[in-house]
Image: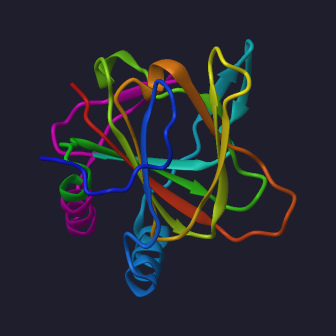
Amino acid sequence: MKSTLPELEELPDATIRYQAGFLDAEKAGACFETLYRDTPWRQDPIRIFGKTYPQPRLTALYGNNGKSYSYSGIEMQPHPFTPLLQELLEKVSGATGQEYTTCLLNLYRDGSDSNGWHADNEPELGQNPAIASLSLGSPRIFHLKHRQRKDLRVRLLLEPGSLLLMAGATQHHWLHQLPKTRRPIGPRINLTFRKIY
């Protein structure tokens, strides 16, 4: 299958696509309310430079192959997909031309919740993983930067109902983050679909 998402822009060493309005406002709002209310959110401790802190967001893992997912010293066991997540999985797979087994959900409760610079390059994701991120709730700024070329940086507003795909060699050459903001902002959920081998 081929992706139907438009290219974000011509970026070296990356395949990045973005579509605003992938879900219409009514559907995006309904999905946010259901997931915010019904997801078994958890806050894991995360180890940074030898110190342990509460992770600055809440998470939940769903999967259809029973395989765990590990990152930053955290190992998560998947819940089975709900009907809503299965529906979104199929819609995202169709649009991106990729197969996914797993969805990691992140809840950013306000502007003080964040995700620091990282790449989704864990061994269980394979050589060139495709990561599709569906945004719901409040819009947030998303940053990308090239690992070697310090002049290459991208700033993108992830709107509710939007879909971002990072594929190909992106995770080898680029880092991404969702930074903190002091602006008053409501909660955001993003669903990150990925394939675990």
**Residue at point 78% right, 49% down?**
180
Residue 64 position within the rendered picture, expressed as x and y whole percent measured from the top left: 17, 45
Relative to 88, 114 lies left or right: right
Q: Quadrant of residue 26?
A: bottom left
**Residue at point 52% right, 61% down?**
189
Q: Nearer the viewer, residue 53 or 17?
A: 17
Relative to 153, 98 lies left or right: left
Q: Quadrant of residue 110?
A: bottom right
Q: Nearer the viewer, residue 24 or 124?
A: 24
Give the extent of the magenta segment.
63-92
Is 139 one of the magenta-colored residues? no
**Residue at point 74% right, 14% down?**
49
Residue 69 position within the rendered picture, expressed as x and y whole percent measured from the top left: 36, 30
Residue 40 position within the rendered picture, expressed as x and y whole percent measured from the top left: 43, 57
Is 65 one of the magenta-colored residues? yes
Residue that sits furthest to the left in the current view: 1
Location of residue 56 with respect to 5 vertically, above or below: above
How many numbered callouts?
A: 0
Relative to 154, 71 lies left or right: left
Which color scheme did the rendering employ for the protein? rainbow
Split into 4 quadrants, where in the image is the C terminus? top left
Residue that sits furthest to the front in the current view: 10
Q: Nearer the viewer, residue 174 or 37?
A: 174
Location of residue 138 with respect to 71 vertically, above or below: below
Location of residue 127 with respect to 118 vertically, above or below: above
**Residue at point 73% right, 26% down?**
151
Q: Nearer the viewer, residue 52 or 127?
A: 127
Relative to 40, 53 lies left or right: right
Residue that sits furthest to the bottom in the current view: 26
Residue 70 position within the rendered picture, expressed as x and y whole percent measured from the top left: 42, 25
